[in-house]
């Protein structure tokens, strides 16, 4: 599959209609569906920029990110495509987690910036950038977008904001986290308090169960 065909497959999946097949008890919290993702311009910008992004030609030995490096990402996804589902998830999580953690201000001079995969793979990034690249990776592998969400949450141990990718698998929700190499069930994580979650179609507020 060519570079452009690979991105086209991602784009078609990302823009597919939602089916809302996601368990409602993420980290033991209730979810309240909201209507429009336009409340989140950073996320809308990620979707738009990924659709129109064009990476310059270059050699993989260059430090500056180019089409050769992006092709390495797509080649990695092609290599793991035939693996069992759980091994695919582990591979996608590890691949992204190998990238360097860099604050948005150091990368872009902004307090908050949501990067597309090309930018993250070239520059490193912070927690939501790991989650975004994992989402696009799994979309390329055929995972339905309605079963995945970027989750913005509070880490109650570290008392900081954080973001992860959540994937609904049957009645469970699996968490791909840049702080953890293993893909874990949300039921095994007790120190995350979700604030909101979002995919390409809509977003959800999360509130504690009474």
Image (cartoon, rainbow, N blue to C red):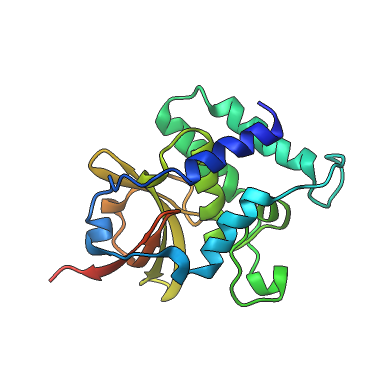
* Residue at the image point whose x is 60% and y is 27% from the top: 78
**Viewer can see residue 159:** yes
Please identify the quadrant where the C terminus is shown. bottom left
**Viewer can see residue 127:** no
* Residue at the image point whose x is 55% and y is 40% from the top: 10
**Lateral position of residue 22 relative to residue 203, left or right:** left
Residue 153, placed above or below residue 79: below
Please identify the quadrant where the N terminus is shown. top right
**Lateral position of residue 177 relative to residue 42, left or right:** left
Closest to the observer: 9 or 64? 9
How many marks the image carries: the answer is 0
Residue 115, placed above or below residue 172: below
Residue 203 image offset from top left, x and y in percent: 37, 62
* Residue at the image point whose x is 46% and y is 62% from the top: 163
Name the residue furthest top: 82
Q: Quadrant of residue 28?
A: bottom left
**Lateral position of residue 207 relative to residue 179, left or right:** left
Name the residue furthest left: 210
Residue 132 image offset from top left, x and y in percent: 53, 53
Residue 192, placed above or below residue 100: below
Residue 150 image offset from top left, x and y in percent: 44, 57
Closest to the observer: 87 or 14? 14
* Residue at the image point whose x is 45% and y is 74% from the top: 160
Residue 97 image offset from top left, x and y in percent: 57, 50
**Lateral position of residue 63 relative to residue 28, left or right:** right
């Amino acid at each position: 599959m060519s570079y452009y065909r690979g991105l086209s497959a991602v784009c078609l999946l990302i823009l597919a209609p939602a089916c809302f097949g996601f368990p409602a008890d993420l980290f033991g919290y209730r979810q309240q569906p909201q209507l429009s993702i336009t409340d989140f311009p950073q996320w809308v910008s990620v979707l738009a920029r990924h659709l129109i992004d064009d990476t310059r030609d270059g050699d993989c030995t260059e430090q500056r990110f180019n089409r050769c490096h992006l092709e390495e990402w797509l080649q990695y996804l092609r290599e793991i495509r035939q693996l069992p589902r759980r091994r695919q998830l582990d591979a996608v999580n590890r691949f992204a987690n190998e990238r360097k953690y860099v604050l948005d201000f150091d990368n872009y001079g902004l307090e908050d910036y949501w990067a597309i995969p090309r930018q993250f793979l070239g520059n490193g990034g912070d927690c939501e950038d790991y989650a975004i690249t994992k989402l696009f990776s799994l979309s390329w592998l055929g995972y339905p977008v309605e079963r995945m969400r970027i989750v913005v949450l509070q880490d109650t141990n570290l008392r900081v904001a954080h973001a992860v990718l959540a994937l609904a698998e049957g009645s469970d929700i699996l968490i791909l986290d840049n702080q953890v190499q293993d893909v874990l069930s949300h039921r095994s994580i007790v120190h995350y308090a979700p604030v909101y979650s979002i995919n390409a179609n809509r977003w959800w507020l999360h509130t504690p169960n009474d």
